[in-house]
Image (spheres, rainbow, N blue to C red):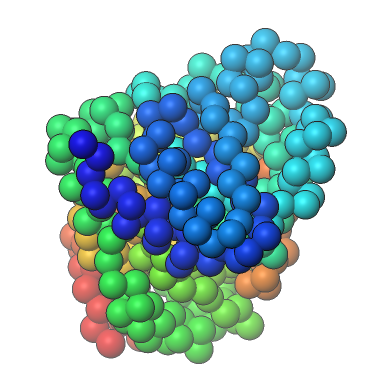
Amino acid sequence: MTDPRVEEYARLLVERCIDAQPGWQVVVKTRPAARPLAEAVARALAQRRAYALLRVGFGPLDVDFEWAKEAPPELVERVAPAEQHTYETIDAWMHLSAPEVRNEGGDLPLDRDQAYSKMIRPFTARRLSFSMPWVACRYPTQAQAEDAGMTLEEFTEFVYGACLLDWDAEAARMTRYKERFDAASEVRIVGAGTDLTLGLEGREGMVDDGHYNMPGGEFFFSPVEDATRGVIEFSEFPAVDSGHECEGVRLVFESGRVVDASARTDEAHLFAQLDADAGARVLGELGVGCNPGIQQHVKNTLFDEKIDGTIHLAVGASFPFLGGKNESIVHWDIVKDLRNGGQLYLDGELVQENGRWVI
């Protein structure tokens, strides 16, 4: 018997996250393991008189994973003409991720990984500009549960506990904090191995209250590109990316760029990302996690960046609609835990300590 919460989850994705309208063409990128959710989403789209364009794949990419591993890089970096038309004309995009193996994507050769990033960059830019509705989410699988150190039943409860919230109430709560950041010129992050200052002058943030990523539960900014200075050490959690886990990432910024970097594990992947292009060493995002249903790291950025009492930084592409000007094929979110000795300051005023707000 299908969990009745699947239907509630599907309605949330279709009705709140993308607010599907009659006649819309909605690409639903999904996986075999997510069939119950994909079917429920298709029904919900039909009820909204929208088209469900299902794309069922067997890996983490928008193209076939085995094809991407074998095809020459110059082919991987070019979008197939039929898909190019799709990317340019669809009205909304959904990604129902359900990985069936751990560290999925880690065996994609670097040259093909970067070629794929180039191929998908125009569509990624369309999503990051928020010129069309989109949502990414997860359907519980055994592989994700094992990454999180949970049973499948525990991970399923975790997913629904993080997603099926009163999002209007969460929006009101997060907006209060976001508006305080909007009024600030700079934010200082202090914690274990960390003293980093970012510029926010003239930049307004955005609240993710269950309209884009699911779960939502953050507010975020594109910092001033040349104003980041200091050091940050991501000592609490590994930085997870495309099947790679970089532990102990440390980044030193001067005039907005990473000038020194290190990691205890998989340092080669860290530098491959930082050296991917000219914009990869610039900070594209500052996010503040606020989801009360997420209290632990599960090696899944979609959830981890929303942990209540954390911040995350993304090196690479920024958000143009938030004033960001940095361009890159990279957008890598890395999470810093502030719940044990961390502080956030806005223009010198303490606003959060040990992950708890004091404003």
Q: Nearer the viewer, residue 170 or 55?
A: 55
Q: Does residue 151 appear left or right of residue 272 in this picture?
A: left
Q: Does residue 221 appear left or right of residue 346 in this picture?
A: right
User: Which residue: 40% across, 53% down?
Assistant: 10
Q: Nearer the viewer, residue 308 or 33?
A: 33
Hey, which residue is sitting farthest right in the picture? 81
Q: Position of residue 258 (x, y in %)?
A: 58, 50
Quarter of the figure that contains the C terminus? bottom left
Hey, which residue is sitting farthest top in the picture? 70
Counting labels gives 0
| On screen, residue 24 above or below 277 | below
- Is residue 260 at least partly visible in the picture? no
Q: Quarter-wise, where is residue 153 in the image?
A: top left
Q: Position of residue 330 (x, y in %)?
A: 62, 44
User: Which residue: 23% across, 65% down?
Assistant: 292
Q: Position of residue 304 (x, y in %)?
A: 34, 50
Quarter of the figure that contains the N terminus? top left
Q: Quarter-wise, where is residue 203 in the image?
A: bottom right
| On screen, residue 33 above or below 223 | above
User: Which residue: 59% across, 59% down?
Assistant: 49
Q: Does residue 312 appear left or right of residue 47 in this picture?
A: left
- Is residue 41 at least partly visible in the picture? yes
Q: Nearer the viewer, residue 321 or 227?
A: 321
Q: Quarter-wise, where is residue 70 in the image?
A: top right
Q: Position of residue 284 (x, y in %)?
A: 60, 58
